[in-house]
Image: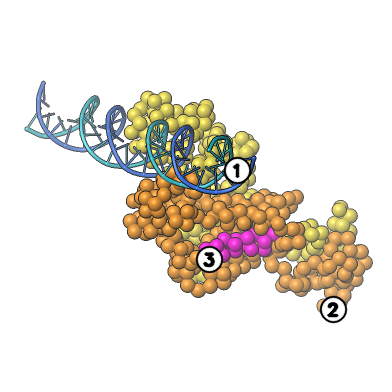
Chain colours: A orange, B yellow, C cyan, D blue
DNA sequence: CGACGTGTGGCACTCCGTTCCCCTTGAGAG
DNA sequence: CTCTCAAGGGGAACGGAGTGCCACACGTCG
């Protein structure tokens, strides 16, 4: 029934345009009652995005199931990938919809509001992970927006190419850019990752400008830190 | 006339709610014909955001008038500030509208689509400035989204405080965060910049996961480093 | 057989937004 | 003073989206 309505709607939308098609046209073509249309789709716009509701639910479930062992920024990037996978499931359908929304302002506005709900889901998750952190809410909102923008940038370029090529590769590259800008620490090199608890501090990543950086876990005995610094400086 | 319609509309919206108020109610209260309402506002939602159209035009003009002597990211931050200034012109009106949009889903959706147009204006400008740069479009979209998100974050926190306090200070801080992430050079945060030669090491940026980072210039006397670590750990 | 829950169709209604036409007002030309 | 013309406002009616209500056709269970 849903599928029949969606199919009928898209046939008419592509044939004579979205605004030139009334709900009555759709239901008569599908052979169902007008009232049934609004049972399955709260509005005429919703028939254009039939699976976003489910996808949004999947995303929130995915985020809700994340533990503290996941790095937050990486996690929201993975969540954004879920949306891409939904698009990639039906490339031809996605491309048709893209062409439609591109030229119907009302649909663009509706799509924007849908995207906004994804963004809020990501931001809410990040806010939870950033509680206590300085400017936690600000960082969460900004990073969520950046992830969504990168995702959409890559998605649209894939759609413009008529769904040819690997969508995931493009999106991953775009998300990698965001991760590099906001990463936990600007993408810690192995030298900058904290040492496992109990292990001695690792010392002295030599950066330009003669700067020494020591990375250590809080609570490490001081003498071990000093020892590490000494060897780092002495080796100079 | 516009003003009379806006005033009448908000009186009724605050009195009995947005959806419970019909356009006929507004025009009868304002004492004008129904047709005149739609002459000034293309839709019922537009009466809630009467000056966004002008503000968007101002922003695009501002960006169009920018030359290459302006640093792009800084420029879009200044453009975003224009929106804030519009809100700050009528704090009480802005706060009322904020409360309204917060609880009416339809208005939220409309506001989102308005915000999206601002974002597109910023992104278009940045795309122009980033032509030829690697991933120019991607960077433009992501930075525009980040700027808008930071702006909105600060704006909403100002609106939640009923418009008390300096709006510009909050927004500037938020935008500064974006600039620090995307600035011309990755712009290390003050805590991560090396200390000037001769100055004592600065200690202990507490990052999540119980990690302590010490940044110091190579050649700093060891005792000063240890001292700094001790105070950093001791403060815990 | 009848009661009941569920999914569907049909009708009528409200309201938004638009189209078409008429009215007033006021300025300028004859 | 009258005619004309343009512009801004008002009114009537219409099309279409979305909703509420009720009736009907199925099934299942008692």
**2 and 3 marks on the same chain:** yes
Find out whether residue A227 is within the magenta segment: no
Q: Are marks 2 and 3 in contact (CB under 8 Å)?
A: no
Task: Check disc 1: other Cα within 10 Å, few if <14, some if 14-19, many if 20+.
Answer: some
Residue B230 pos. (x, y %):
89, 59
Nearer the observer: mark 2 or 3; the answer is 3
Q: In terms of depth relative to the viewer, which is nearer, B109 or A1?
A: A1
Residue lying furthest bottom: A235
Chain letter of the residue beneath label 2 in the structure image: A
Under tag 2, what secondary structure?
loop
Under tag 1, what secondary structure?
helix
Residue under circle 2? A235
Residue under circle 3? A89
Task: Check disc 3: other Cα within 10 Å, few if <14, some if 14-19, many if 20+.
Answer: few
Q: Are marks 2 and 1 in contact (CB under 8 Å)?
A: no
Give the number of the disc on residue B156: 1
Magenta stretch, main secondary structure class: helix
Chain letter of the residue beneath label 1 in the structure image: B
Tell me, yes or no, if residue B59 can be seen here: no
Find out whether residue A84 is within the magenta segment: yes
Q: Which residues are magenta?
A: A72-89
> Considering only vertical position in the picture, is D18 above or below A148?
above
Residue D3 pos. (x, y %):
10, 29
Residue B48 pos. (x, y %):
47, 37
Identify the residue at image location x=34%, y=29%.
B33
Task: Report the Cα–Cα distance between label 3 and label 1.
Answer: 37 Å
Nearer the observer: mark 3 or 1; the answer is 3
Among the 4 quarters of the image, the one containing residue A115: bottom right
Task: Check disc 2: other Cα within 10 Å, few if <14, some if 14-19, many if 20+.
Answer: few
Q: Quadrant of the C terminus of chain A?
A: bottom right
């Amino acid at each position: 029934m849903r599928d029949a309505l969606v199919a009928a709607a898209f046939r008419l939308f592509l044939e004579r345009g979205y605004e030139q098609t009334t709900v009555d046209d759709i239901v008569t073509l599908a052979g169902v009652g007008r009232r049934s249309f609004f049972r399955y789709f709260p509005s005429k716009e919703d028939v254009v995005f039939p699976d976003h509701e489910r996808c949004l639910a999947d995303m929130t479930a995915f985020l809700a199931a994340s533990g503290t062992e996941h790095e937050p920024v990486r996690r929201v990037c993975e969540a954004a990938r879920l949306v891409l996978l939904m698009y990639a499931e039906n490339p031809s359908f996605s491309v048709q919809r893209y062409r439609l929304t591109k030229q119907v302002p009302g649909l663009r506005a509706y799509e924007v509001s849908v995207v906004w709900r994804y963004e809020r889901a990501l931001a809410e998750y990040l806010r939870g992970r950033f509680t206590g952190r300085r400017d936690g809410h600000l960082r969460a909102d900004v990073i969520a927006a950046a992830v969504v923008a990168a995702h959409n940038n890559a998605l649209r370029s894939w759609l413009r190419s008529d769904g040819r090529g690997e969508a995931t590769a493009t999106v991953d590259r775009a998300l990698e850019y965001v991760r590099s800008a906001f990463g936990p620490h600007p993408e810690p090199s192995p030298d900058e990752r904290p040492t496992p608890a109990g292990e001695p501090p690792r010392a002295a990543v030599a950066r330009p400008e003669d700067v020494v950086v020591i990375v250590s876990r809080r609570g490490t005995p001081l003498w071990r830190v000093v020892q590490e610094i000494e060897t780092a400086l002495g080796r100079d």
